[in-house]
Image (tube, rainbow, N blue to C red):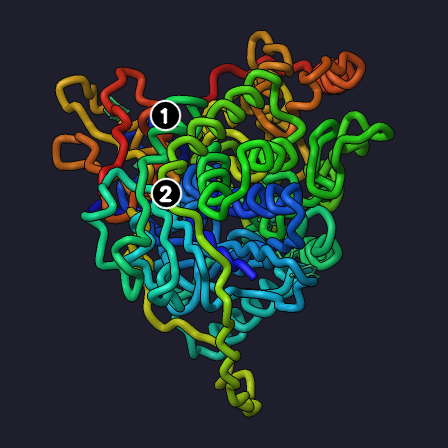
């Protein structure tokens, strides 16, 4: 077995530089075809075994259900509101132990919050804001399935306009399903000036790996929003997870980008964006926009919002894979 | 009262099956109740659902301990300790099993009598008629309705009530067609009668759980990487099968498998861990050379 993706590497160029070794093993209760797990598994290949994952209640709490764990490192389960506070406690404890000589520096571990969008965008935002503000040296991985998944797909402030959820059903007065727009968590995080913020997609594993490699060289808050196609909640066949992950990026609905010390770079700008409909169509949560009658106004609104975003982007960064 | 317990895996539609049966019963004039129960689990993991049909208001709630009919969507559940679909069955219980096997090959099933085991390949019926595994709910809900003596029109009314209003007209029609086929498939089977006498429920003594401090009561796992001991291979409906002669060893399937169920051998050929692979079929869908095919599980 090779070691995790070598930390001496600054970046990788091909799939075959991704670590062969696994750091999240099979046998968990996560749905087959979970896009969030695909992203976390790839991230863990860079983070390696010396990690403690600090989890906020959500789907991924089922990764480690007593008495089983898929991890080679540690796991701490916290409440939805307090994962970042948990990370602060763990980080502080490690630092104190090292300062007192009770923990050799070589046994130090990376502290990694793993939280869903409900926790990240809504319930736990306050604790995260505090942790970034205090300059906590930690990682934050949000797998964004755009709803409260574990409890049956209720709307969160990450749910995009036009998606149907259990709490935003389609009706005479809400033909679009969710009427709110998705909160811009990237910008909210960036406004705190953390060391690093990035968006990642499981379908762009080289881009994902390189962002984790880059963050590994930085101290402070390293924050990731992972697009997490969710067959169970978005209502599509699990084999299509990578398709929707790719289409989200190719349509421009999900922008791959990073910000180091607040300066934003788009890491992949498709030469021409595909129409958003290619991403929306086939996902059950958007079916009402196409059937039984087409909701042109809602579709236009989604397309316009994407177009407005990209009108403000002037980079032409090449091919991410 | 008639008590029906459905067993399936998350995603096989047994919650909907139990609702279809409930709605069909309602259309037939019964007082009905249905409810599902999930563990802290996801699509693929065992779940069950309960339907009660009665002539009097139903005061019972929760799990059905002594079922008149048990509907099993997936044979692998028989061996699953988290499911135990035959629990509480007695000599008067009936089993409806979705399987490729004949009912004779299935018995003995606990205390259930040989004559009360009915088997058919509803998965094949569903795939033939609707090309969708999701409509297993329709097939089993309707077959159960027939076993309880409900008419075809009552069963169809149940289906129409419970199908998602967001389904296209074409899919609706296919599901109705499947309902008719599934009903016909069950027509040769005898109708389950309500039990005349109900055994009085046995009283249980409640055990008081003493308070333990969190250091004792909070679960801690001191092992690492032991999740593979819990095999998730039974979740599969289809298995990915590699045709190595087509494989270009590009790593794509290995990188994409969310489960880490694909390893690469010394020559970079993918090796699927069938004990764990959940059958999401991402690898089949993603392989650029179509070196993986999906084959239906026969168990
Ligand atoms: C304060 C609080 N409210 C509600 C819950 C119940 N709950 C547990 S998991 C969950 C969903 C979390 O959603 P998200 O963070 O998006 O993660 P996902 O389940 O989608 O993975 C909810 C609402 C809780 N644990 N704590
Ligand atoms: S519900 Fe969605 S996010 Fe949650 S485990 Fe299943 S696929 Fe993953
Ligand atoms: S994706 Fe296909 S060609 Fe590539 S390694 Fe896997 S099986 Fe072989
Ligand atoms: S079907 Fe393929 S991608 Fe899905 S779990 Fe199995 S090996 Fe992995
Ligand atoms: Mg979520």
**Residue toward you, A282 or A264:** A282
Q: Which residue does the image show at 49% across and 48% down from the upper left?
A: B148
Q: Which label belongs to residue A13? A: 1
Task: Look at the image and tell me whether residue A39 can be seen.
Answer: no
Mark 1 Cα-neighbour bin, 10 Å: few <14, some 14–19, many ≥20: few
Task: Look at the image and tell me whether residue B9 can be seen.
Answer: yes
Residue at image mark 2 = B189
Q: Left or right: A158 with respect to B123?
A: right
Quadrant hosting residue B62: bottom right
Q: Which residue does the image show at 13% across and 31% down from the upper left?
A: B267
Name above or below for residue B59 compared with residue B281. below
| Marks 2/1: CA–CA distance | 63 Å
Q: Which label belongs to residue A305? A: none
Residue B170, given in percent of the width and then of the height, sits at 56, 16
Chain under numbered label 1? A
Residue A214, given in percent of the width and then of the height, sits at 48, 39
Mark 2 Cα-neighbour bin, 10 Å: few <14, some 14–19, many ≥20: some
Q: Which residue does the image show at 71% across and 46% down from the upper left?
A: A121
Q: Residue furthest right?
A: A173
User: Is disc 1 placed on a helix, strand or loop?
Assistant: loop
Quadrant hosting residue B132: top left
Name above or below for residue A149 compared with residue A229. below
Q: Which residue does the image show at 62% across and 68% down from the upper left?
A: B60
Name above or below for residue A57 compared with residue B214. above
Chain under numbered label 2? B
């Amino acid at each position: 077995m090779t070691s995790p993706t070598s930390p001496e590497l600054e970046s990788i160029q091909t799939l075959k530089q991704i670590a062969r070794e696994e750091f999240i093993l099979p046998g968990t209760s996560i749905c087959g075809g979970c896009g969030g797990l695909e992203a976390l598994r790839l991230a863990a290949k860079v983070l390696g075994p010396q990690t403690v994952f600090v989890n906020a209640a959500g789907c991924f709490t089922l990764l480690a259900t007593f008495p089983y764990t898929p991890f080679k490192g540690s796991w701490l389960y916290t409440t939805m509101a307090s994962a970042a506070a948990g990370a602060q406690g763990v980080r502080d404890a490690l630092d104190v132990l090292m300062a007192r000589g009770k923990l050799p520096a070589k046994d130090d571990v990376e502290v990694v919050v793993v939280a869903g969008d409900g926790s990240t965008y809504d319930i736990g935002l306050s604790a995260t804001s505090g942790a970034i503000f205090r300059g906590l040296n930690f990682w934050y991985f949000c797998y964004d399935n755009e709803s409260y998944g574990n409890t049956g797909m209720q709307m969160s402030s990450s749910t995009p306009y036009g998606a149907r959820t259990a709490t935003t059903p389609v009706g005479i007065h809400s033909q679009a399903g969710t009427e709110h727009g998705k909160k811009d968590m990237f910008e909210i995080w960036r406004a705190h000036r953390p060391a690093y913020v990035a968006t990642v997609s499981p379908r762009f594993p080289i881009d994902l790996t390189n962002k984790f490699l880059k963050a590994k060289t930085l101290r402070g808050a390293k924050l990731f929003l992972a697009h997490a196609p969710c067959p169970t909640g978005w209502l599509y066949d699990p084999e299509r997870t990578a398709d929707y992950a790719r289409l989200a990026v190719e349509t421009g609905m999900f922008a791959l980008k990073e910000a180091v010390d607040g300066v934003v770079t788009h890491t992949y700008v498709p030469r021409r964006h595909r129409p958003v409909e290619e991403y929306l169509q086939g996902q059950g949560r958007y079916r009402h926009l196409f059937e039984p009658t087409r909701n042109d106004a809602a579709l236009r609104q989604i397309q316009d919002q994407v177009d407005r975003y990209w009108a403000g982007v002037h980079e032409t960064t090449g091919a991410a894979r | 009262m008639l008590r029906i317990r459905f067993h399936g895996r998350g995603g096989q539609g047994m919650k909907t099956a139990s609702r279809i049966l409930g709605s069909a019963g309602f259309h037939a004039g019964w007082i009905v109740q249905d409810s599902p129960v999930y563990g802290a689990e996801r699509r693929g993991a065992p779940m069950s659902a309960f339907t009660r049909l009665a002539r009097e208001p139903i005061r019972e709630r929760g799990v059905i301990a002594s079922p008149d009919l048990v509907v099993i969507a997936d044979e692998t559940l028989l061996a699953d300790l988290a499911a135990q679909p035959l629990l509480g069955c007695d000599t008067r219980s009936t089993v409806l099993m979705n399987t490729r096997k004949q009912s004779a090959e299935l018995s003995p099933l606990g205390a259930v009598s040989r004559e009360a085991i009915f088997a058919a390949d509803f998965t094949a019926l569903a795939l033939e008629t609707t090309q969708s595994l999701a409509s297993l709910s329709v097939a089993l809900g309707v077959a159960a309705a027939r076993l309880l003596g409900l008419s075809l029109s009552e069963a169809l009314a149940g289906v129409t009530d419970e199908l998602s209003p967001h389904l296209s007209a074409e899919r609706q029609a296919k599901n109705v067609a499947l309902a008719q086929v599934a009903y016909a498939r069950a027509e040769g089977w005898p109708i389950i009668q309500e039990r005349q006498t109900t055994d009085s429920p046995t009283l249980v003594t409640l055990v008081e759980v003493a308070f333990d401090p969190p250091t004792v009561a909070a679960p801690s796992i001191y092992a690492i990487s032991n999740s593979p001991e819990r095999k998730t291979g039974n979740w599969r409906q289809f298995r990915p099968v590699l045709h190595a002669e087509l494989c270009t060893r590009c790593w794509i399937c290995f990188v994409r498998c969310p489960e880490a169920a694909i390893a690469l051998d010394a020559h970079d050929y993918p090796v699927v861990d069938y004990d764990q692979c959940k059958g999401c079929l991402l690898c089949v869908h993603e392989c650029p050379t179509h070196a993986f095919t999906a084959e239906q599980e026969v168990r």
